[in-house]
Image: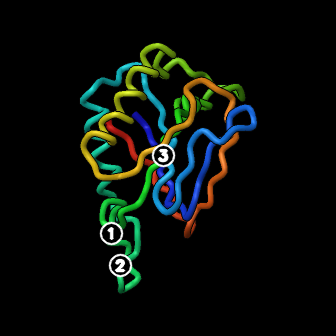
Amino acid sequence: MRAVVQRVSQSKVVVDGQTVGSIEKGLTVLLGIGKDDTSKDVAYLANKIVNLRIFEDENEKMNRSVLDEQGEILVISQFTLYGDCRKGNRPSFINAASPQDANKLYQEFVQVLKDNYPLKVETGVFQAMMHVEIHNEGPVTILVESK
């Protein structure tokens, strides 16, 4: 699994003109599922993301997590994170999970966050054309992988 994690002051997802997910201070997580990913990857990545110390403490050091900040998380499925552009100019998505497998693990990831952490968790719509508005603070953007 791959995740692009952005520290945000606010973020939202709009589908067909309707806001389907919206958060204030917290993390926007663009989540890609690989063809070899399992529930172990889900548990690892969920724990890693909620404990990332990318919020500043009183000394202006990145030393606090979204849990410490009582922040919120917006999770958006992003299969293009598995786009491989090393050969040619058109990305290959051969390493991305099938839509059926990806949706299962995406839903599991969201449920793990909701069940195990005292955070507001919002989502986009799997396989929908989404308009994503991200107010990145810093900017702070971290790439996290489970492998």
Task: Give the percent coordinates (x, y) of residue 40.
Answer: 24, 30
Q: Residue furthest front?
A: 18
Task: Give the percent coordinates (x, y) of residue 111.
Answer: 34, 34
Q: Secondary structure at mark 1?
A: strand
Q: Which residue is painted at 64% across and 26% down in the image?
A: 128
Read off the residue under disc 2.
Answer: 57
User: Of the residues under marks 2 and 3, which one precedes in the sequence?
Assistant: 3
User: Of the residues under marks 3 and 1, which one precedes in the sequence?
Assistant: 3
Numbered marks: total = 3
Within 10 Å of disc 3 (Cα), the crowding (few <14, some 14-19, many 20+) is: many
Does residue 21 sit above or below 87 in this rendering? below
Q: Locate the N terminus and report the quarter of the image it occupies.
A: top left
Mark 3 and mark 1: Cα distance apart in space:
17 Å
Q: Which residue is painted at 57% across and 59% down in the image?
A: 10
Q: Is residue 142 left or right of residue 62?
A: right
Read off the residue under disc 3.
Answer: 29
**Among the 4 quarters of the image, the one containing residue 72:** bottom left
Task: Give the percent coordinates (x, y) of residue 21.
Answer: 56, 43
Q: Amino acid at mark 2?
A: Asp
Within 10 Å of disc 2 (Cα), the crowding (few <14, some 14-19, many 20+) is: some
Task: Give the percent coordinates (x, y) of residue 32.
Answer: 48, 33
Q: Is residue 135 left or right of residue 75?
A: right
Query: Does the CB distance between marks 1 and 2 fall below 8 Å?
Result: yes
Q: Residue furthest right?
A: 17
Does residue 44 sit above or below 102 in this rendering? below
